[in-house]
Image: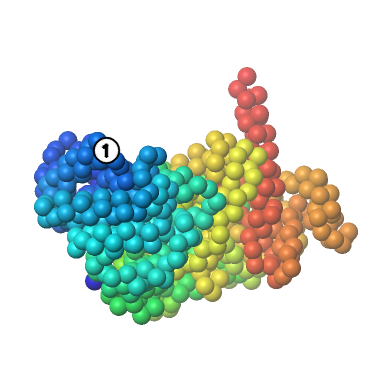
């Protein structure tokens, strides 16, 4: 049976950190990149012991480079180099040394010569009791395709020589995947797996910066693994990701992401009936966001309650024993937690007034928690939440919590004294939420939502910010009940950067609430003093040139600062409140058959927010003079 492995090159830090992170994430095998050994203060045998103590088997050392096709003294030098690497491989206790196809300009491309070099190298390796794996680099001088590497390996015909398959090179070159299933299993020395974004660029740059874990990119990784399994391969499958964002993040969390991505791939393989893969408990069905919890205190809490009231919410419950209030309207429940100790308080000290938790109503809490465990997400320990009852939870973005509730478990509403009915509207439900995350966390949270909550990801979109760029990827549950947009930004003064600075990290920035009548909702909210983002007149002049739009509708939009988008399927009307303490804002949306997020208007929103922030900065500057 195939076993999951990770190459040390995926992780940041020194060798000891990398190995410990891999072991903690549940890996039992690692592939060692020679640089990690070069900078390790001990000997190869010490590294071997270190790995063994952590329960890790070193499955391969890599790479031996620019070996085959050399002539004259260079060829002799290459064999000398190979001998030293074989000694190192032996000292590490690894069974395999990986050779990458040569990129040397003067390397001969003569097939007979390459075949002879590999045969001789395999014979040398046999003296050490070792195997050689040959990998076609997509940018190799003469050998670029796995089919070519496999052909050479077959011709060299040594029992201890096989091909190293790497999904990155195979997919970047557009090599066929299905014929991998016809390879004799004993001719596959190692299987490496890396996904990548389908960007049009040279494969070397793509490989160095845009590799990612299975499921984080666009390559058909599951097809690849299925072909490998059908070939009868039963060795290690090793993640091999070159990506500076990975190395810049915590090795522990990146190692866990790796395991999570492989478990998710294994789930799809099991569903396809490929033997040897276990299906984890199914992801929960998310029925609806049940409540959003805000942590706030003092004047912040008072002003936030005012904002809720302005938006038409009514305080429908006070907690029996805690400083926690429930505000409701339609199907939307918002909670303000003003406690002076506990989780929400600690979160507020770190981030200021903020969304500290999201509660999801699911079909089964038990399965949601089992699924989380299977994806290496620990249950949040301790007494948590606004309820007296223990609500099962896991950690979300920046240490916020995701609680799970279902029909079988205790009802958190029982903890509230309530004698007021929630008004039916105009706001009816949470339409979507957005998380702003650091660039280096984007793939990680995308993977989390996909694997733990079973959300489906849509392609990433790129939008101009007045101070840089804005990238967004939306994720949604298959039934559409939960939609989360993950946003990142580039540029020091972008809206995303300003948020990250103000917030002290990643978090919930946008809470979009649905209505059936946006004009009534906005008029009522304005009447109660809610301030919305001012939209320049020019936006509406431009709108009239983009769409054929009834003059009275255009004037209503303009009068209330409501944004508008239209696609074939329908129309979208939406409006944003001014940000609360520069941290989060509400959006009110009316969908008329429209199923997107209004990304066409995101530049208008970002520009309006930038204008406001600049105006505020000018006021502060004047006040300081
Ligand atoms: Mg490779």
Check the picture and name the quadrant holding the C terminus. Answer: top right
Q: Residue 199: in sight, yes or no? A: yes
Counting from the top left corner in percent of width and height, residue 189 is at 25, 61
Quadrant of the rendered image containing residue 518: bottom right
The relative height of residue 387 versus residue 130 in the rendered view (above or below) is below
Q: Is residue 215 left or right of residue 230?
A: right
Residue at left 31%, top 51%?
Answer: 114
Residue at left 35%, top 54%?
Answer: 111
Residue at left 36%, top 80%?
Answer: 273
Residue at left 29%, top 62%?
Answer: 155
Q: Is residue 588 left or right of residue 197?
A: right
Counting from the top left corner in percent of width and height, residue 138 is at 42, 52
Quadrant of the rendered image containing residue 278: bottom left
Check the picture and name the quadrant holding the N terminus. Answer: bottom left
- Mark 1 highlights which residue? 72
The relative height of residue 408 versus residue 522 in the rendered view (above or below) is below
Q: Residue 398: in sight, yes or no? A: no
Counting from the top left corner in percent of width and height, residue 80 is at 18, 40
Front-most of residues 89 and 131: 131
Say which element carries label 1.
helix
Front-most of residues 615 and 45: 45
Q: Residue furthest right?
A: 551
Q: Is residue 55 left or right of residue 587?
A: left
Badge 1 crowding class, 10 Å Cα cut-off, few under 14, some 14 to 19, many 20 or more, is few
Counting from the top left corner in percent of width and height, residue 533 is at 69, 47
Front-most of residues 111 and 162: 111
């Amino acid at each position: 049976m195939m076993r999951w492995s990770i190459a040390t090159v995926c992780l940041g830090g020194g060798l000891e950190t990398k190995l410990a992170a891999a072991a903690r994430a549940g890996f039992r095998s690692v592939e060692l990149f020679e640089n990690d050994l070069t900078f390790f203060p001990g000997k190869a045998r010490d590294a071997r012991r270190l790995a063994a103590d952590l329960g890790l088997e070193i499955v391969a050392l890599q790479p031996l480079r620019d070996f085959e096709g050399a002539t004259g003294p260079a060829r002799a030098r290459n064999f000398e180099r190979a001998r030293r690497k074989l000694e190192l491989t032996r000292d590490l206790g690894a069974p395999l040394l990986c050779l990458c196809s040569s990129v040397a300009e003067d390397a001969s491309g003569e097939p007979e010569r390459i075949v002879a070099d590999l045969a001789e190298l395999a014979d040398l390796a046999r003296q050490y009791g070792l195997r050689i794996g040959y990998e076609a680099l997509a940018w190799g001088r003469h050998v670029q395709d796995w089919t070519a590497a496999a052909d050479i390996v077959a011709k060299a015909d040594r029992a201890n020589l096989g091909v190293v398959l790497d999904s990155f090179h195979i997919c970047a070159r557009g090599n066929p995947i299905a014929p991998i299933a016809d390879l004799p299993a004993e001719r596959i020395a190692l299987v490496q797996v890396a996904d990548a974004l389908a960007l049009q660029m040279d494969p070397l740059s793509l490989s160095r910066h845009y590799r990612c874990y299975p499921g984080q990119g666009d390559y058909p990784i599951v097809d690849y693994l299925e072909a490998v399994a059908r070939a009868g391969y039963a060795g290690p499958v090793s993640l091999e990701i070159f990506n500076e964002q990975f190395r810049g993040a915590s090795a522990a969390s990146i190692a866990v992401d790796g395991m999570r991505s492989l478990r998710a791939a294994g789930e799809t393989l099991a569903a396809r009936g490929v033997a040897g893969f276990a299906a984890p408990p199914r992801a929960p069905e998310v029925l609806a966001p049940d409540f959003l919890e805000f942590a706030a205190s003092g004047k912040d809490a008072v002003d936030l309650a005012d904002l809720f009231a302005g938006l038409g919410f009514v305080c429908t419950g006070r907690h029996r024993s805690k400083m926690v209030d429930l505000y409701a309207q339609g199907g939307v429940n918002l909670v303000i937690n003003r406690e002076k100790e506990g989780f929400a308080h600690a979160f507020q000290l770190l981030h200021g007034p903020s969304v500290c938790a999201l509660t999801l109503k699911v079909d089964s809490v038990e399965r949601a928690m089992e699924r989380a465990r299977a994806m290496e997400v620990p249950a949040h320990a301790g007494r948590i939440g606004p309820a007296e009852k223990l609500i099962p939870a896991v950690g979300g973005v920046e240490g916020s919590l995701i609680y799970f509730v279902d029909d079988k478990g205790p009802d958190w509403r029982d903890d509230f004294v309530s004698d007021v009915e929630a008004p039916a509207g105009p706001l009816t439900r949470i339409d979507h939420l957005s998380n702003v995350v650091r660039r280096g966390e984007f793939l990680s949270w995308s993977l989390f939502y996909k694997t733990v909550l079973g959300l489906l990801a849509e392609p990433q979109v790129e939008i101009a910010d007045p101070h840089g760029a804005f990238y967004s990827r939306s994720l949604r549950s298959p039934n559409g009940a939960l939609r989360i947009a993950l946003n990142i930004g580039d540029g020091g003064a972008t809206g995303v950067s300003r948020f990250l600075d103000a917030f002290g990290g990643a978090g919930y920035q946008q809470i979009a609430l649905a209505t059936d009548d946006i004009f009534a909702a906005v008029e009522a909210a304005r009447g109660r003093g809610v301030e919305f983002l001012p939209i320049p007149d020019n936006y509406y002049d431009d709108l009239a040139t983009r769409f054929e739009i009834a003059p009275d509708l255009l004037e209503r939009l303009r009068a209330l600062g409501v944004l508008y988008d239209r696609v074939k399927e329908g129309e979208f009307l939406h409006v944003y409140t001014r940000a609360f303490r520069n941290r989060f804002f509400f959006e009110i949306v009316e969908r008329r058959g429209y199923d997107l997020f209004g990304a066409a208007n995101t530049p208008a929103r970002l520009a309006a927010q930038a204008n406001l922030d600049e105006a505020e900065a000018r006021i502060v500057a004047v006040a300081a003079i």
